[in-house]
Amino acid sequence: MKLITSLSLIFIFCAASFAQSSSTPLQQPNDPSAQKARAVLDQAIAALGGPAYLNLSDMEETGRTYSFYHGQPNGLGAPFWLFWKWPDKSRVELTKQRDVAYILNGDNGYEVTYKGTAPEDPEDLKQALRARHYSLDHVLRKWINEPGVALFYEGRGITDQKEVEKVTIMNARDESVTLEINAITHLPVRKSYQLRDPQTRYFDEEAEIYDNWRPIQGIMTAHSTVAFHNGDMSRQRFIETVKYNTGIPDSKFAATVTYAPKKPGR
């Protein structure tokens, strides 16, 4: 199930905590770089839908997702059904039969297959929670409003053949994310961050590129998302349908463990 697990990670960026405002005072009020960075971020939030974007309660998506290995396609892809609810619930159903599902409910993760419901593999759960923590929505709606956040304007550049303005957000935990915002539309083009590999001690870069933006219920929605690991394409997702604020019940994310997978060698 490792391949399907890796496919499910592309959705985690949607499972974010939504703040209700982006008006928290700057921690660097007299710093021109911070002021410019805040202005760029405020423009991005407005372009994404402003209050409609900030006050999302839930979302449903369908589409197709693909995984890659060393930048090469790994299979023909898989259809997906995604259910997400503020602030920390998500459910991804995969395969044509929708008989494989991955659930995040708070800090708990579950894998549902024909065998039943099992706790998600600890390493896979760690990656899923980390992806949620660094998600675009989490950064734009939570990080930038936290006490001790520092904002840095990194100037202009070209990304994915678009002129962008680069902003780095660093929270009080010394974690940072760089966003590259389209200088004309003010919509996000690329998000990236680095993490140190605990074994090699080298830094790995995780990045996402967003494209094919369309307005859905007053919210600009990227219908194409491509993820990269150290510059190599790792996952790709195409949205076919999306609906917001449908009133998804909490029961959609309820899970009860019915079996424990056997560990290798047992």
Image (spheres, grey):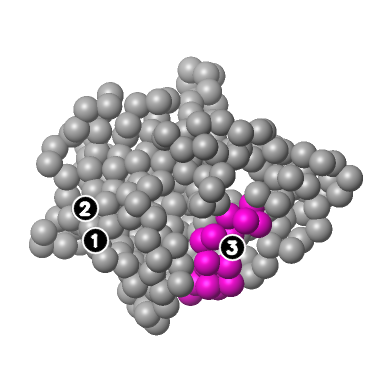
Q: Is residue 163 above or below residue 145?
A: above
Determine the residue positioned at 70% across, 52% down. 39
Q: Amino acid at mark 3?
A: Ala
Report which residue position mark 2 lands on: 64
Mark 3: secondary structure? helix
Cα separation between marks 1 and 3: 24 Å
Whichever of callouts 2 and 3 sits on the residue coming sooner in the sequence is 3
Residue 119 at least partly seen: no
Q: Is residue 14 magenta?
A: no
Tag on residue 240?
Answer: 1
Residue 119: x and y in percent read 34, 54
Residue in front for this viewpoint, 257 or 15: 15
Q: Amino acid at mark 2?
A: Arg
Whichever of callouts 1 and 3 sits on the residue coming sooner in the sequence is 3
Cα separation between marks 2 and 1: 8 Å
Residue 204: x and y in percent read 48, 26
Determine the residue positioned at 76% across, 61% down. 24
Mark 2: secondary structure? strand
Q: Is 204 placed left or right of 139 in the picture?
A: left
Query: Label 3 neighbourhood size at 10 Å, few (<14), some (14-19), many (20+)?
Result: some
Determine the residue positioned at 64% across, 40% down. 167
Whichever of callouts 2 and 1 sits on the residue coming sooner in the sequence is 2
Q: Quadrant of the N terminus?
A: top left
Q: Is residue 51 above or below residue 153?
A: below
Magenta stretch: give its range. 41-57
Residue in front for this viewpoint, 241 or 202: 241
Mark 1: secondary structure? strand
Query: Label 1 neighbourhood size at 10 Å, few (<14), some (14-19), many (20+)?
Result: few
Tag on residue 46?
Answer: 3
Q: Is residue 138 above or below residue 177?
A: below
Q: Is 106 placed left or right of 239 in the picture?
A: right
